[in-house]
Amino acid sequence: MLNKYYWWQYILIVLFIIIGIIYSLPNIYTDIPIIQINISNKNLSKIKILENIKNKLNVNRISYKKYLIKKNNINIIFFNIENQLQAYKIIKENSNNKYSVIIKLISTIPKWLSFLKAKPIKLGLDLKGGIYFLLRINNDYIFQKLREQNITDLKLILNNKNISFQLKRLNNFNYKIIFSNNVIRNKVFNYLKNKNNNFVNYIIINNGLLVSMKNKWFLELKKAIIENNIDVLRKRVNQIGISDSIVQKKGIDNIIIELPGIQNLSEAKEILGSTATLEFHLVDNNINNIQNNNFSYYLWKNKIPLFLNKKIIIDGSNIIHSNISRSEYNQPQVNIFLDDKGGNILSKFSEKHIGDNIATVLVNYINSDKKDKKGNFIQNKKEEIINIATIKSKLNNSFVITGLKNIKEAKNLSILLRSGSLSAPIQIIEEQNIGPSVGKENIKKGMKACIIGISICIIFMIFYYNIFGIIAVIALFINLIFIISLLSLLPNATLTMSGIAGIVLTLAIAIDANVLINERIKEELDNDISIQKAIDYGYKGAFSSIFDANITNLIISSFLYSLGSREIQGFAVTTFIGILTSMFTSIIITRAIVNIIYGGKKIKKLPI
């Protein structure tokens, strides 16, 4: 029979609509802004602390909704995030490290929706507010490190052959080797040329050689450095629980990090901006090594002088996992787990050095007050011994680091090691705080654009197509529900301002499809065929045009996502999703409603 669906088709359509509504619902709930004050010291009075905080908030005219006193903490609930952020700064400044202050958002989504894994749409930085970082990679560090390794190998070769020479270090990897005469120079040149020519160029200049890295290797190494650093930074972001983040490269040496809705800026900067890694060195008291300049001099606890062998046993690159725990004396410690390579190295080394001491050195790069020619702060290498341990037996793939100041230091070190070490140091060269008020303003503008656009479409459809216009409007709202639910369900989908523009566009595309269907039905009615046939032919005739147009739009959206910037990608995602849902609602949903109203009935006139 014309214009009739099977009963199971109606049930399936209703089921899709119910699922769409359920997974759209979390977006109507807002998070509760809270400041949690944790008091571990039993001698401190929670009442006095609360009274002091209330006085400070009142003086600064910061309003709050209510407070809750629990066993070990105080929770202060605020009306909005702006008040929460203002209060956090004041409370933190007046804490004097007597108690910890944590800022967070508590979800109000009902448990039954959480059970169904229903979550709100992830909002981008332009809608939610947050922090924007621009990081620059110090590639010189890795090139200079490779140069020193190359020079060490070269020194060994030349010293074994009793060849005297001089070295002059240049920028990046490059350096010069100067010999006493051209005969020695030519012999060394021929030897090095035949021995190792994979990534190094040797060029004869006067009575010496210029050693440089081949351009192909230079570019590949820079690419590998930025890719590894991006991977490490992404892991760090995930470790500190910042969701919906964006970590991507900008140019050759820069990385962009966007943290929407971030609450704890100082912790994020401390973790993301840190270049910390671990190195393990043998405590070396061998007078020969000291005289041969094979050691580094350090001052440890109580200014105790220590000599460490320069050779690194293992470093952060060999660590695959770490976590924190407490020792038998209730002191914080970090449990280290090595990869197979690191485990084998440590096992062989410890077997030969039972009774000797190993130093754990925390290596970091700190910005100085001086700037280089490019205007960037020069970074100084900072090394700190955090632990000295005696090798009592053969070690394996795991061991423990003690000697940490507190549990926070242990936690931060564990996060850095767990996420991996950076290939090269980074520095924050730009930091922008985008407040939630900016995001709210963008959402208001986006919603206003949606409402105006949809309202014009609704007025036009109802005025011009009567009942069929109302059916198209119902399908339009169902389409909007489907778009919102799919954006909520997709794990990596983030809604931005450009994404809202994509939604508005696809709603217009959905109306356009119904215009095609309605006009085709009117054409069939003008040919004096029955109303039931006109409806059937109208939907079938318009389908090919709608399908072809939407397939073209889907292809364009795919290219926009593949080749476009972040803003273009946000537009492409919502457009792609909207096109798929609009095809379903414009063709299937409207047809189902038309079938229910007019299918199988004798109608003299069709209100279209």
Image (tube, rainbow, N blue to C red):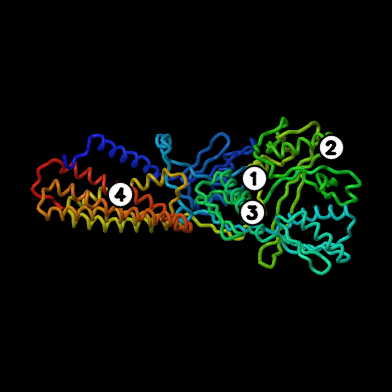
Q: Identify the disc placed on residue 420.
A: 1
Residues packed near mark 3 inside 10 Å, few (<14), some (14 to 19) or many (20 plus): many
Q: Which residue is mark 2?
A: 356
- The residue shown at (18%, 47%) is 536
Q: Is residue 565 left or right of residue 220?
A: left
Name the kind of residue labelled 4 in the image.
Met
Mark 1 lies on a secondary structure that is loop
Instruction: Tell me what residue is drawn at x 41 percent, y 56 percent.
Output: 571
Q: What amino acid is labelled 1 in the image?
A: Gly
Circles 2, 1 touching at the beta carbon (< 8 Å)? no
Label 2 sits on what residue type?
Asp
Sequence-earlier tag: 3 or 2: 3
Q: Is residue 257 visible?
A: yes
Residue 80 at x, y percent in the picture: 46, 50
Q: Specify the quadrant of the image occupied by residue 210.
A: bottom right
Distance CA(mark 4)–CA(mark 3): 45 Å
Please name the residue that numbered disc 4 is placed on.
583
Q: Which residue is the extreme one toward the bottom?
A: 206
Q: Quadrant of residue 600?
A: top left
Q: Give the mark nearer the N terminus: 4 vs 3.
A: 3
Mark 2 nearby-residue class (10 Å; few <14, some 14–19, many ≥20): some
